[in-house]
Image (tube, rainbow, N blue to C red):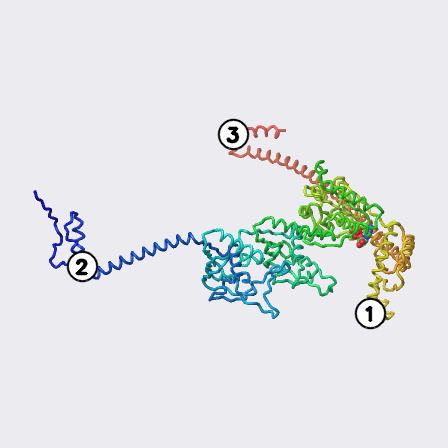
Amino acid sequence: MDATIQTPSPTPPTSNVTSPEFAMFHYSSPFPLYGWISMFFPILRNPYIVESLRLFLFGSVLETCRRICRWALDRFTSGFFVTAHFQQGDWAFDWLSEFLAAQEIWTNSREYRVTVSNDQKALAPGGSPSTTKVPTEKGDGAEDDSDDDGYPQPLYFPASDNTQVIRWRGRWIQVTRKAGHISYNTQTEEGSSLAITIYTRKKQVLDDLVAEARQHYISTRKPPLAAQTGKKSNLTIKATFEQSDYTYSWILEFLNTHNAWQNTNELIVTAKSDEQKWGMALGGNDRAGDEEGKDEKLRVYYQPCKQNVNLWNWKGTWIQLQRNGGAMDYRSMKESGGSISLILFTGRKETLDELISAAAEQYWSKSSRRVTVHMYESYRDWSTTITKQIRPMDSLILPHGMTDLMIGDLRDFMDNKDWYAAAGIPWRRGVLLWGPPGTGKSTTVHAIAGELQLEIYCVPLSSGDIDDGSLQRLVAATPPSCILLLEDIDCGFRSRDNEGDDDDDDADKPFNPYRIDTKKRVTLSGLLNVLDSVSSEEGRIVIATTNHIDKLDPALLRPGRMDLLVEYKLATRQQNIDLFTRFYSRDLMTRTAKSSQGAKEPTQTAIEVSDEAASLVKKSDNSSFFFGSVPTAAEIADLSIQFADKVPESRYSIAQLQGYLLCSKRNPRGAIMNLDQWLADREKEEADKEARRAKKAEEKAKWLKKEKFRQRKERQMDEEMEKEMLAEAEETKKSENVQEKGEQDGGETEERRAADDDLKTPDGASDKDSEPVMVESARPSSSS
Ligand SMILES: Nc1ncnc2c1ncn2[C@@H]1O[C@H](COP(=O)(O)OP(=O)(O)OP(=O)(O)O)[C@@H](O)[C@H]1O
């Protein structure tokens, strides 16, 4: 059977369809969708639409091809090229920038930003001849930004995005620099980046390039860009040295001797010698403070301003230095609480260790030529440091062997730390130097410090500024292995037995019973606490000095607190001989004779002195009147015996005799000639002083007598008054008793009378009922 399938057609075919492409739609489709699609046939017959569709198809094909090509190219590039990106603020960026600048890659740029700003020098990526200069060790990065005319050189920065190609080790490298923006605050470029494409398949080439750039950067010793832009990399180490800590002195000294602050251009200029520790060089000179033979009047010291930031290169490592200001003490006009911060641009922690050990080593090696004394100032702890020339032990004029005994004991102590630890005994040594003033106690401490290379931390207990709290704090802030010097230990507090005693300084002043003592004092228990405290266990030598051992509490002198007691006496005959011989040693005499001749001539010819002027001007030093020959050693020995024969033994201190000899420092014969007169004057002075003391003692005794009498009188009066008051009280009591009794009797009579009255009253019956007992008891008494 023939069957024909008839598909309904939504649009009946028309006779004018001639185009073959439309003819294809005329076949009969088995799917119903055809009917829907065929609805668009009229649109497709529009030639414009057909043209647009054609274009669309063509575009799509083109875009697809482009994308395929791009994808293929990328695959090819990633397979045959190596690309790396570097972002500003990173060290790798600094290396590459510097390296490319050295290859003069940016000289072909077409747009520049030109500046002379010193701040941006390190950022300049080439193009300027001045930026290629390599800092020297001495200059430490101080690039010479000015020729002799004093004007700076221009710096060129590629201003816009830039792509350049260089050839390196036979390969082509494409460098694209993306410009950053100018920071409003720092006026430097920020956010720039570099992209490097190397035409190679090997990543090793990139490694080599970066390694070479890094090596180049190190060799140029350029300051790190991170430091210049203020951006801190995490590859830095920051160390702060507080003024209150002793490492501060180490680093300060080290920085100064290495001219580390040399590049700073904000300076404080001072002529105060106590600021010398900040003294630094300018313009490549030696430190201002160290210039030998420079006229004192012309000597100035430069200090970096506070908060000033400075870059310094130490052994190839860049270090950013900053001096941080502390608070100003308006009493002493000195600063305290300051610090020095170092930022080391390295990831190597050992560099900081090396720097600090180098600083400490230098400090201590320098200290071996001098003694450092840390002084206490009110409320400022160990803020003042002075350095003194070392005093050789053999310059002390003491009984022979005395210094050897002391040094031997202290050396033994220093060398036996382990023994103390093993024995469980605190590793500390207490030494008490006692004796009259001017016998060399303080001088001995300086000589010991020099000999044992220890620093002195000096607490002047008599200053009146120190109490228990401050003493404890001061001692806790001392380093291990040092000398803690407690000067005039008897003046720091009043002993229990000498409560009413005057200070030694006041011995010559008139007696004033109403004087108010405003001085701060350390208590005995406070001092004992400090001597025994744990903080005194780290190899400290506590040296106390006193003129009055008798004023000290026995608890202080107990072994363990004071282990070595050394007595100083007024000069013996042997000391007198030693003093004279030393004072007029041939070495000293020839030295002074030379200098005096040098100074003598101009003044001698110029001056004409009238008798009146000569009588008015009293010169303590008569040495200029000596023009004789320098005495021989034998003569000096002979004169020293004469000197010792004349000076009474154990009567004068070395300080007094030294003071006398100073008046004749170039004239030993004159010293002997004038000695009698001087001794007579001293005797008279001493007698006067004694008389004043006796008078004062007498006044005091009188006052005490009067005081006692007054107190006795007062006591008597008090007693009498007390007696009177007692008698009065007795009297009052008696009269009160009598009155009370009278009142009692009067009360009873009154009651009785009232009772009688009650009985008489007409309404008394009711009262009688309510108080039967009273009435009953009242009746017998009334009848009686
Ligand atoms: N024994 C000595 N040897 C060398 N010089 C001495 C001696 N005694 C005193 N002098 C000199 O006298 C001066 C004062 O000495 P020093 O200050 O050491 O005495 P002191 O006993 O500590 O006095 P004070 O008890 O008043 O503190 C110093 O300049 C020192 O040079």
Q: Earlier in the sequence, mark 3 or mark 1?
A: 1
Determine whether the residue tagged by mark 2 lies in a helix, strand or loop: loop
Instruction: Give the camera-side residue of 229 and 132.
Output: 132
Q: Residues within 10 Å of mark 2 (few under 14, many from 20)?
A: some
Q: CA distance from mark 2 to mark 1?
A: 129 Å
Determine whether the residue tagged by mark 3 lies in a helix, strand or loop: helix
* Residue 565 in the image, given as x and y percentages of width and height: 79, 43
Instruction: Give the camera-side residue of 13 and 113.
Output: 13
The residue under label 1 is 602
Mark 2 is on which residue type? Arg
The residue under label 3 is 769
The residue under label 2 is 45
* Residue 406 in the image, given as x and y percentages of width and height: 79, 44
Q: CA distance from mark 3 to mark 1?
A: 136 Å
Mark 1 is on which residue type? Pro
Q: Residue at the far left: name it.
A: 1
